[in-house]
Amino acid sequence: MSGTLLVVILIFLFLMALMGIKTIRPYERACVERLGKYQRTVQPGLNFIVPFIERLIKVDMREQVVDVPPQEVITKDNATVTVDAIIYYEVTDPVKVLYNVAQFRLATIKLAQTNLRNVIGDMSLDESLTSRERINAKLRDVLDEATDKWGARATRVELQRIEPPSDVTEAMHRQMKAERERRAVVLEAEGIKSAAILKADGEKQSRILQAEGQAVAIEKVAAADKFRLLTVAEGEGQAIERVYGAIHKGNPTKDLITIKYLEALAKMADGKASKLFVPYEASGVMASVGMIADLLKDRKETDEKATTEKA
């Protein structure tokens, strides 16, 4: 009898030990209640509690998602829109999540719906449709502040849908279409204007460049003509100086000047002109020529006579 009782006691103790062994996973925390009162928080791993006296409540510490169902919200300009959202949150204090709020998910959803009405109610329809980021940020701040005492933190809030009534949607589509057509017309007109300006500017630049090119060419041609005239004048001046210098240096006789004069007249007569104007001094020169001819004739006769006498 005593042996059977011992076996029963051992089996009871073994079962009690199994019931007292609890495993906590890495992403979990657990609160231990002893006789209905919070006693401690246990960490991931193998933990022991006293069966029938202590109770272990696990809390998931991973980031969770709460889907806020659609609801109708009235904007500042009395337009009704349907909105819904998604809230991402994570538990920061398992004790507060268990003991400070009864139904955390339901409380979060109701809090989000209430604040969505407040946030969008302060905006016009156009603002609410174009201010998703501002609505998300404001709603996240409100939820983060409200859930702090519940031991959770709203990490992100995303609006999924903002839908105005069908008639408003149709009017917005027409407005958007008209606006796009207006932009297309404006862009086309600006393109034509820009093209005309560019074309006129191109023609202007072309004419300016042509005028500048002509001016440079005229300047260079004039400079070349000037250089040529100066060079020729300088050469002629030097030639005259040398000729007169040579003449004065050679002490020319009157006969030599007369011969040179006649050579000059011969060159003048050799031209293509049909008329020849002889200078006034030519008569005197011609007389001199006659005298020179007589002189040469007398000298020739004298030479011939002297030759005959010698023979």
Image: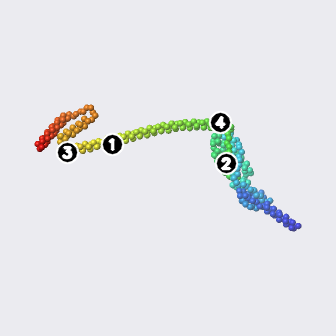
Q: Which residue is mark 4?
A: 171
Front position among marks 2 and 1? 1
Q: Looking at the picture, which amino acid does disc 2 mark?
A: Val
Q: Looking at the picture, which amino acid does disc 3 mark?
A: Gly
Q: Which mark is residue 287?
A: none
Q: Which residue is mark 1?
A: 227
Q: Residue at x 74, y 61 (%)?
A: 46
* Marks 2 and 3, how far apart at CA: 121 Å
Judging depth in this view, the residue of 34 and 92 nearest the camera is 92
Front position among marks 4 and 1? 1
Q: Are marks 3 and 4 in contact (CB under 8 Å)?
A: no
- Residue 225: give x, y in percent of width and height: 34, 40
Residue placed furthest toward the top: 275
Judging depth in this view, the residue of 139 and 246 nearest the camera is 246
Q: Residue at x 67, y 51 (%)?
A: 155
Of labels 2 and 1, earlier in sequence is 2
Q: What secondary structure is marked by label 1? A: helix
Of labels 4 and 1, earlier in sequence is 4
Front position among marks 2 and 3? 3
> Horizontal placement of 225 versus 5: left or right?
left
